[in-house]
Image (spheres, rainbow, N blue to C red):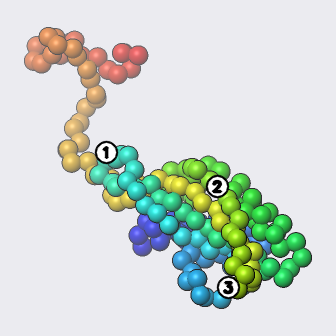
Amino acid sequence: MNELTTLHEAITATIKLAMPVLETVEAYVPANQSTTLPALLHAITGLKPGIDPGDGRSCIAATFEARILVDSNLPQASLQAVTLATQLAVLLRKQFWGLDFVEETQQVQALPVLAVPASPVAVEWRVQWEQVLRLGIVQWPWPDEPGPLAFAFSPDTGLGNEGSYQSPEDLA
């Protein structure tokens, strides 16, 4: 299983647990597929390079989007949709999904989606957020050297100056 599959499964499980009123919580559902409402459908909608962590992994800033759909025939459907969007926004605060390769959520925003008159099936809100993903395997191309880390300053370095070296703790 790759990191993106693991991430989407963690997002789905976390939202299902935190928001049990949702009948459907799924990733990458086709727009034409019928879904039991209320529903939350999530996906990655954008990728851009992140800051290289310098450890061999790729760093990607991912934009996520969750579509919250509520049956428009229900009384207070608009209020239920905005309530669910707000609950998700609160859940997203400092969210890591329990994964060590994901940084906390950033730039959370929620907006209503204007209904299309020809298809008034659901009231919809969209919640967007960004998260940095560190993908791949940590790589350290240098051999692990035995012994402690020590510092010395020129010209008191090298053979014959071993007594001039200091540990990082001594420099504090």
Q: Nearer the viewer, residue 160 or 128?
A: 128
- Which of discs 3 and 2 lies nearer the camera? The answer is 2
Q: Judging from the image, what secondary structure is the residue with disc 2 in?
A: strand
- What is the crowding at mark 1: few (fewer than 14 residues within 10 Å), some, or many (at least 20)? few
Task: Name the residue located 67 percent from the left edge and 85 percent from the top edge.
Answer: 35
Measured Cα–Cα span from mark 3 to mark 2: 24 Å
Tell me if residue 17 can be seen: no
**Which label's residue is closer to the chain start, 2 or 1?**
1
| Residue type at the position of mark 1 | Gly
Q: Find residue 126 and report its horizontal and vertical position in percent.
A: 65, 66
Measured Cα–Cα span from mark 1 to mark 3: 43 Å
| Residue type at the position of mark 3 | Thr
Residue 111's quadrant in the figure? bottom right
| Numbered label attached to residue 54 | 1
Disc 1 + disc 3, Cβ < 8 Å: no
- Which of discs 1 and 3 lies nearer the camera? The answer is 3
Q: Nearer the viewer, residue 76 or 139?
A: 76
- What is the crowding at mark 3: few (fewer than 14 residues within 10 Å), some, or many (at least 20)? some
| Residue type at the position of mark 2 | Gln
**Which label's residue is closer to the chain start, 3 or 2?**
3
**Which label's residue is closer to the chain start, 1 or 3?**
3
Q: Nearer the viewer, residue 141 or 74?
A: 74
Q: Find residue 49 and report its horizontal and vertical position in percent.
A: 37, 53
Measured Cα–Cα span from mark 2 to mark 1: 30 Å
Residue 110's quadrant in the figure? bottom right
Q: Which residue carries the number 3 mark?
A: 35
Q: Can you say whether 11 is above or below 92 in the image?
A: below
| Numbered label attached to residue 109 | 2
Q: Quick one: which residue is furthest to the right in this view? A: 75
Q: Judging from the image, what secondary structure is the residue with disc 3 in?
A: loop
